[in-house]
Image (cartoon, rainbow, N blue to C red):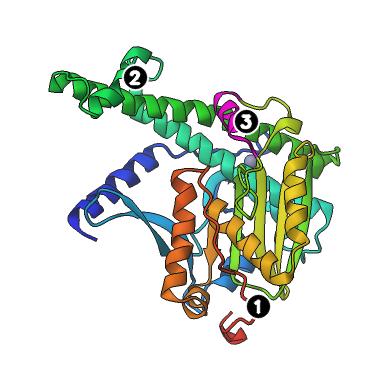
Amino acid sequence: MNQDQIEFNKTLGQKQKEASVKGCLRGGDEQAGCAGKIVQAHSIQRGKILASIADGGSGKVYYLGLAPADDMTSMIPEFKLEGIKKFSTFSGFCGWHDKSIFQPIEDVVFTATAKQKDIYAYRAAAKELHANLESKRLCEIQLGDKLGVEDFPPHLQAMLPLILQGLVEVPPFIKKAMLEGAAKQQIKIRHKQCEHNIAELRQICDDLTGAIDHDHPSEFEHVYHSLEGACPVACCTSYIPYFDHDGNRIISEQDERRMALSRATRCLEMKNVMLNVFPEAGRTHFIFTFSKGNQTFKDAIERLLKLDNGSLRIGLSNILLNYAENSAYGPNYIEENFSPEQITALKEAFSSTVFDPSAFRKGSINLFVEAISVPPSNR
Ligand SMILES: [Zn+2]
């Protein structure tokens, strides 16, 4: 890392620290029923799952992340190492709720009961809710008292591209002010999107909590599948599936634009999908959770599950690489099973959707290799 990169990481780290949100999502505003301090809760379980993915004794897993390029003009995707004590954690539960809510999936063998699937889905939604609360706060810190101020009127917004192309000339100080206005406008849009996401995710969490705690009928359903072989790959995420595993659009561009402007008020209209992937007891498990109103997604997953074993594994890999930011991989598993060219392709598939969720990159790599070369003694 050069000095610029170090400074960049430092500033980013400070901003993120200021924006951190510590509170129990289950306790609500009153923190009802909470006990103990707010903990760093794992969204991917440390003892059973992350420890089995980390290479023997190292206690570290790979994840895909972004780092500033040497010239600082772009962000490049990388496999990064992180200790399993920290990886996938978020400060969204008190000690008591973290222990009691997740006990049925942490201390009990996974047998794909309805309750276990609900709890896995709930954790993915809660993690995403917490991430959106922090993103919203980060926008507020960046904008300060300019949050509610409309200082970049539409006629100036329309003129900016012409100025940037050199078709319209304005004094440099005006151009600078307009560029700043455009940057702030982006943050305001992001802030609005966070508010929509937070409202939807709160509703999803409430629905699943009702099912978990009180056996209320849920408006969400699961599709569960497991593959032969415990691959050292895990994820816990929530995403909007604009594309199926094969890169075909399943949310139209028109719907995508509409979704950016307004939020779904009923669970049945929601497009969010919660995805959990984890190795346990010699198999790799996949739980997709989605609204009962999302028939298009259900059809797409059912089409995927009908494919032959090889194509199915590639399809699942494409979904994971394009949509799952919060994923852990065994470092030796990645280094030993994939060529440098394949590793580059994995990173590129990941980065395409990080920058633009509607840019799906279809690849032909199978992340779920059947014959695992890591000896059992190291896993
Ligand atoms: Zn609590």
- Tell whether 249 sits left or right of 305: left
Instruction: Indicate the amino acid at tag 3.
Output: Asp
Question: What's the mark number on residue 370?
Answer: 1
Tag 2 secondary structure: helix
Q: Is residue 317 visible?
A: yes
Question: Under tag 1, what secondary structure?
Answer: loop
* Label 3 residue SS: helix
Principal secondary structure, stretch drawn in magenta = helix
Three-letter amino acid code at the position of disc 2: Gln
Which segment is the magenta one? 251-262
Q: 344 or 47: nearer the eye?
A: 344
**Residue 48 location (% of width, % of height):** 64, 68
At a point 78% along the width and 41% down the height, the residue shown is 295
Provide the residue designation for mark 2. Answer: 157
In the image, what residue occupies the spot 44% across and 53% down? 351
Q: CA distance from mark 2 to mark 1?
A: 53 Å
Q: Which residue is mark 3?
A: 255
Residue at 72%, 63% (x, y): give it: 107
Assign the C terminus to one quadrant of the image. bottom right
Against 129, residue 83 (above or below) is: below
- Where on the image, by quarter, is ligand 1? top right
* Labels 1, 3: front one: 3
Mark 2 surroundings within 10 Å by alpha-carbon count, few (fewer than 14), some (14 through 19), many (20 or more): some
Residue 280 to residue 181: above or below = below
Residue 261's tag is none
Q: Nearer the viewer, mark 2 or mark 1?
A: 2
Mark 3: few/some/many CA within 10 Å (<14, 14-19, 20+):
few
Please check the rendered image and state whether residue 110 is part of the magenta-colored stretch, yes or no: no
Give, as a three-letter code, the residue at label 1: Glu
| N-terminal label among 2 and 1 | 2
| Residue 254 sits inside the magenta stretch | yes
